[in-house]
Amino acid sequence: MTTPQTRSDLPVGPLPLPETGVQWNDLQKELAMLQAGDAKWRDGRVFGIYFPTRGDIEKVAEAAHSTFFRLSTHHPEVFPSLFRLEQEVVAMAANLFAADDSIGNVTSGGTESIILALKAARDQARAERGITAPELVVARTAYPAFVKAGDLLNVKAVRIPIDAAFRADVRALRNAVNANTILIAASVPTITHGVSDPVREMAALAQQLGINFHVDASLGGFQLPFLRKLGHPVPEFDFTVPGVTTLSADLHKYGYSPMGASVLLHGNAATYKYQGFAVPEWTGGTYRTPGVLGSRSGGGIAAAWAVMRYLGQEGYLNLTRILWETTQRFIKGIERIAELKVIGQPQTSVLVYSSQTLDMQLVAKGMELKGWSGRPQADPPSIRLLLAPYHAEIVDNYLMDLESVVMSVRNREPLTQKAVA
Ligand SMILES: *Cc1c(COP(=O)(O)O)cnc(C)c1O
């Protein structure tokens, strides 16, 4: 596979270290100047990437993070404290997702969780079923990390169509699986449409054929259990569903932890034992890691642990309630605009809107000029919003700007910039 260019590949030219050290005061100013060109994330103008909540939660996360970020989890015998924190995060997640045992790890993010779920499935299938040309099957709406993981691990990624409700097409799944399929995965929900794949039917097929089944609850993991407690209809998606072997949920999204934390759970030790990697006969003794990284900072784990305990069930319930109400306000406001329609039926705060008549790239561009992060999508042409609790504060401003942008696009007027305070 060819490697596409990314911004970080653009050369900045040779940059020598400063001859003498720079004062922190000056560095701080430089950092602030650099950030001045970024999206106004602290003001709730970014959707996804950063999930704003409340100042007190962020303070707890920062303090816990700074207590542990210098340390590595790589040597649990040296820092049993970190090992304990990771175990407790896994145990709290296991309880939330009805896993019988607490088997899993905190990873660096959803992508690493997916890579490890695939590795475990691949190695288990090779050892126990003799499969040497493995394949995975996901809907074409699944997060690209599945294709990336397949590329890294030499597992062919087969992508199946979606049905009229934007969910993985179970009939297409039945046709796509074969004797080499080692993993089927469902998204709960997808990031591109905000709807959940039919976990129960998909997992039943996987179980019947002896194939591992992963639930990618990156987005829904820390919303759906609380939405259910609040009385919303939530389809079963966790280890209560027969056939589910692994599940991931991102702590750095709706777990409200800082960037760099996801949790990967296994239904049983039989699969988990294939997740890690060991080199037994190394000159340094046995080398062993549970994940992709070697040394990994304890900051993300400590912050996740602290935020989970600081919020407790009550805290997550409150944030989820705010999130739900905020999402409904966005939906109502967006659908008041004649040309716009929210697609699917958002069960969480992942909201996607589209238009039959307007150029959504232009709408996104117009919103960007007004200081919002636009996030246009290709198929269907749409804009996606990953809402966070703090967005309750900006709903009306966003909708006002959206109305004005839609009017400009409708009337083919030039899009205008707005000074952002
Ligand atoms: C965010 C996300 C992931 C993982 O992304 P990371 O950036 O690696 O955390 C996986 N699946 C879905 C549906 C996601 O939204």
Image (cartoon, grey):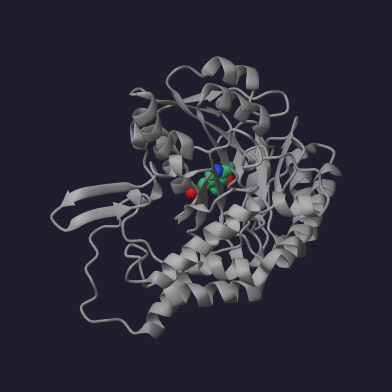
Residue at 79%, 59% (x, y): give it: 321
Relative side of 189 to 181, left or right: right
Name the quarter where the N terminus is drawn. Answer: top left
Could you tell me which residue is drawn at 71 percent across and 49 percent down?
Answer: 224
Count of numbered labels shown in the rendering = 0
Which corner quadrant of the image does residue 115 belong to? Answer: top left
**Residue extending furthest toward the top:** 175
Residue 197 is left or right of residue 325, and the answer is left
Q: Is residue 411 visible?
A: no
At 65% across and 66% down in the image, what residue appears? 43
Residue 253 figure quarter: bottom right
The image position of residue 202, as x and y in percent, is 62, 28
Where is 293 relative to 71, above or below? above
State left or right for residue 33 relative to residue 91: left
Percent coordinates x, y for residue 75 in the rendering: 32, 65
Q: Is residue 61 above or below residue 218?
A: below
Residue 157 at what x, y percent from top left? Answer: 45, 27
Front residue of this view, candidates 38 and 225: 225
- Front-most of 210 and 182? 210
Q: Left or right of 148: which side holds 334? A: right
Instruction: Find the residue positioned furthest to the left.
Output: 283
Give the camera-side residue of 95 and 350: 95
Depicted 178 relative to depicted 393: above or below: above
Q: Nearer the viewer, residue 43 or 260?
A: 260
Regarding residue 238, the answer to whether it shows in the image is yes
Q: Position of residue 48 (x, y in %)?
A: 60, 53
Q: Quadrant of the C terminus?
A: bottom right
